[in-house]
Image: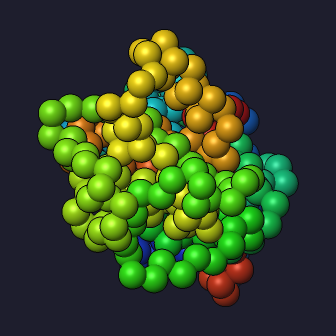
Amino acid sequence: MLCSICSATLMGIWDPAKTPRVCQIKGFLDDNSIRGFELPEDRPGHPDHLHPEHHVFGHHPSQASFEKSVQEGCLLCCLLDSRGQAYENGRTRKLDNLGYFSVLAINFKLARAPVLALFSSQSYVQQLVQELQGSVADFNLEISSSTNDGATWSLIQDHLLELDIGTQTFRLVSAAEIQAGTRYCTLTYAYQVDDVETTPSIFQQSQPLSALPQTYQDAFTVVERLGLKHLWIDHLCLIRDSQLSPDQLTIKTKDIFLNSFCGFGATNATSPSSGFFARREPEYIVPGVVDFPLDGSGNTAVLKFDRQTPR
């Protein structure tokens, strides 16, 4: 993920009103204290002089802000924190007069993709940014707070059939009522005392899904998304007063799982009432991919930031 400060800084480099330009890059690097970052030709008054690579941009305003982003796992901030290089000749940079703990610069001319540089007072790091094939429409960059959002399911929509969820009810059916070869799903979850109490005769009649614990309801949601109708849950589908021994039940259960079309594991649930879908903080999940502005005219490219490949 990229922290909100990295994202906002990168997205606003063509607009001084969005990303502060704290100084000229030539004045900032005129001592050649870092290797491999080519300075642009200085032509005051020329339109290119307003190009982002002529400028240094404000990044994190304080060390506390930077360390918070490192702790949260920001790709770029972690690079500077863990793999930053010392300046030549043991020099340091005073950034406090710029009003920032860290600053950022970018060069578009060193390679086919932009080269990004982050600077703190003690070190710097450069990152060759990889351009991905395709357009922003090919990526899911709008992550919601639920794994059951429409965007998540749209990623596999081409491989699913639409299901009429109808009355949102369920009932227990016998094997004799199910056509041979019918696809069904299975659920693995954490069983606890708050599990639903089962009486086969009750569930042989249509019941509202809302009568089930949340984990069961969410599993049915996934079944619907897959275009299927049948779900096997041991606590509901295994008749406890059957004449099968424990060993026979184990073998039967194994066969049921083995022949299912798809098995779900409610790994986020600590009980049937916990729910199937995870809650998440979107800013921590969004990948290090941005629809990056290449110029001030609205042209963009999808760029990927990776902490594993510093330049």
Tell me: residue 85, above or below residue 229.
above
Q: Residue furthest front?
A: 243
Q: Is residue 125 left or right of residue 183?
A: left
Q: Quadrant of residue 244?
A: top left
Q: Is residue 24 visible?
A: no
Tell me: residue 194, above or below residue 154.
above
Residue positioned 55% across, 64% down in the render: 229
Q: Position of residue 12 (x, y in %)?
A: 48, 71
Of residues 45 and 54, the one nearer the viewer is 54
Q: Residue furthest bottom?
A: 297
Q: Position of residue 293 (x, y in %)?
A: 63, 72
Of residues 74 and 233, the one nearer the viewer is 233
Q: How many marks on residues?
A: 0
Q: Is residue 17 left or right of residue 97?
A: right
Of residues 116 and 308, the one nearer the viewer is 308
Tell me: residue 114, above or below residue 37.
below
Q: Position of residue 26 (x, y in %)?
A: 59, 53
Q: Residue furthest top?
A: 247
Q: Position of residue 105 (x, y in %)?
A: 55, 52
Of residues 289 and 252, the one nearer the viewer is 252
Q: Is residue 193 visible?
A: yes
Tell me: residue 180, above or below residue 30.
below
Quadrant showing the C terminus: top right
Residue positioned 37% across, 37% down in the render: 239
Residue positioned 48% across, 12% down in the render: 247
Residue positioned 69% across, 60% down in the render: 179
Question: What colouring does the structure picture have?
Answer: rainbow
